[in-house]
Image (cartoon, grey):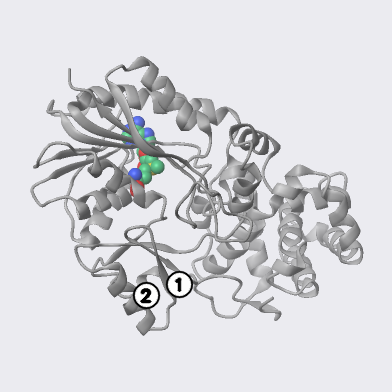
């Protein structure tokens, strides 16, 4: 347990100056309110004062990770929820307090500061004594109350019931490992830009400033502790990008299946913010060409920024991949990467809000969009060309079911050896899935398709 004072630097990677914990609790409660209102945590964080943001983000992450437990405890303490603002504050405090082993603050400090937070806001001041009563009772009866919530799967797994059911149906053997991995903290993983340096050299550069790191996969480096990314050596010079180890498989998989000599024309159809575009460019030759397309103009600006930092060049276009007439010059591509929009059910440990934002109907809706994109882009590939379809999802409807349906309707498509469903896992005892070779990555699905020559 860290930081038992009234001021907080919380669990943030860039500790803020002495900011009272009650202010950060207010911020975390406002994040929870926004997520309950359907807004993503990333968007909601932009409304938080910059000085508070690191601490609020750390508390918000923690609260969203343990929200299922917190809501179940709140139900034990008060059958009828208080008004939304007070409920959010109470749930944040319970999420932070319920497990003493993972607690960021002593529970007495936490309760005191949660009540202070309630008193100091107009929206919650009338509920301050109610919050105080609930939290003090929680302190007195903690073990019994937590034991009661153990009967509730949403409390145990900290995911909505429909999500638990879906993961269980899709992965009957591994559903618990997947959900457990989703609740773990994700490490900072870098992809080393091989044009500028090597994995070994970069690990040495980190060791020289006492940052512990190890290699993962071909070009990945996992840091033992999170740090502020721009402060890492070689950031401005483009020595690395931040990218999970599973996401690092996309570019090499596509390029491994190019059968013709260059120069190659590659389409990255859903490219923003450009993580995989950059990786493709780092691996391709100078005379190869990449078209990086995305429907979102603002996100396309991030492709430009990322490529500029890395010293790479692509043609960047704003466009709908499902409407090639608007952006395609009519020349077939040697390779296409479709990193399709999806539920993001594989990256829950990095985005703990995702599980609370999605609705069960999203899976079928996104699967329809993915099918449309696959079907529209396939004709743009040369005979003999390579196509990678991937999603950062663990749901089979967005992975192998999608591809099996596609193959059934496209006799010129051949499924090549592919990673398939990579399930999220963390380097924890009991959380290893034997099929996966890497031991620390998000959930992803990969299919490599080759177009048969006529
Ligand atoms: C999973 S993200 C891509 C991440 C990116 N490949 C990377 O590695 O950094 C999916 C992207 O698809 C884009 N997108 C969604 N629908 C699209 C469409 N119809 N056409 C093109 N891009 C689309 C979104 O704006 C989003 O940037």
5, above or below 269, in the image: below
Q: Which mark is residue 231?
A: 2
Tell me the quarter of the picture where residue 109 sits: bottom right
Q: In which quarter of the image is the C terminus?
A: top left
Q: Position of residue 151 (x, y in %)?
A: 83, 45
Residue position marked by numbered label 1 in the rendering: 227
Residue 207 image position (x, y, % from top left) = 38, 80
Ligand 1's quadrant is: top left
Q: Please, what secondary structure does the residue beneath circle 1 have?
A: loop
Nearer to the camera, 384 or 290: 384
- Residue 264 location in percent, x, y? 13, 40
- The quarter of the image holding the N terminus is bottom right
Vertical position of residue 337 compared to residue 109: above or below: above
Q: Is residue 366 visible?
A: no
- Answer yes or no: do the residues labelled 2 and 1 have beta carbons within 8 Å? yes
Residue 63 rendering spot, x and y as whole percentages: 66, 57
Q: Does residue 135 appear to the left or right of 47 in the view shown? A: right
Q: Foreground: 123 or 167?
A: 167
Q: How crowded is mark 2: few (under 14 residues within 10 Å), some or many (20 or more)?
A: few
> Whole-Å distance between the Cαs marked 2 and 1?
8 Å
């Amino acid at each position: 347990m860290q930081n038992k004072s009234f001021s907080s630097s919380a669990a943030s990677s860039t500790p803020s100056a002495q900011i009272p914990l009650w202010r950060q609790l207010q911020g975390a409660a406002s994040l929870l309110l926004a997520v309950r209102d359907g807004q993503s945590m990333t968007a909601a964080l932009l409304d938080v004062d910059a000085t508070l943001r690191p601490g609020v983000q750390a508390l918000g992450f923690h609260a969203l990770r343990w929200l299922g437990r917190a809501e179940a405890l709140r139900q034990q303490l008060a059958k009828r929820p208080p008004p939304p603002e007070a409920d959010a504050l109470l749930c944040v405090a319970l999420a932070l307090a319920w497990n003493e082993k993972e607690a960021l603050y002593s529970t007495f400090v936490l309760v005191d500061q949660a009540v202070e937070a309630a008193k100091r806001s107009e929206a919650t001041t009338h509920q301050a004594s109610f919050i105080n009563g609930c939290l003090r009772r929680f302190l007195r009866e903690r073990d019994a109350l937590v034991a009661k919530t153990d009967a509730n799967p949403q409390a145990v797994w900290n995911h909505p019931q429909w999500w638990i059911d879906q993961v269980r149906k899709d992965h009957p053997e591994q559903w618990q490992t997947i959900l457990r991995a989703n609740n773990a903290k994700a490490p900072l993983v870098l992809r080393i830009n091989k044009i500028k340096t090597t994995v070994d050299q970069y690990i040495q550069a980190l060791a020289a400033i006492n940052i512990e790191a190890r290699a993962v996969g071909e070009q990945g480096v996992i840091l033992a502790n999170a740090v502020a990314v721009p402060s890492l050596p070689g950031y401005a010079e483009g020595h690395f990008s931040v990218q999970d180890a599973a996401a690092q498989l996309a570019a090499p998989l596509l390029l491994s299946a190019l059968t013709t000599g260059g120069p190659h024309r590659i389409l990255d159809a859903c490219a923003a913010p450009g993580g995989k575009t950059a990786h493709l460019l780092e691996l391709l030759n100078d005379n190869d060409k990449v078209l990086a397309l995305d429907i979102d103009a603002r996100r396309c600006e991030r492709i430009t920024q990322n490529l500029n930092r890395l010293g790479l060049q692509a043609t960047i276009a704003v466009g709908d991949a499902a409407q090639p007439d608007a952006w395609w010059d009519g020349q077939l591509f040697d390779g296409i990467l479709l990193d399709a929009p999806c539920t993001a059910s594989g990256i829950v440990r990095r985005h703990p809000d995702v599980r609370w934002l999605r609705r069960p109907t999203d899976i079928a809706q996104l699967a329809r969009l993915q099918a449309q994109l696959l079907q529209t882009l396939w004709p743009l590939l040369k005979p003999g060309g390579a196509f990678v379809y991937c999603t950062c999802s663990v749901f089979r409807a967005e992975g192998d079911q999608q591809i099996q349906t596609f193959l059934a309707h496209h006799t010129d498509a051949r499924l090549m050896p592919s990673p398939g469903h990579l399930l999220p896992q963390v380097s924890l005892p009991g959380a290893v899935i034997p099929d996966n070779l890497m031991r620390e990555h998000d959930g992803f699905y990969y299919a490599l398709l080759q177009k048969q020559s006529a």
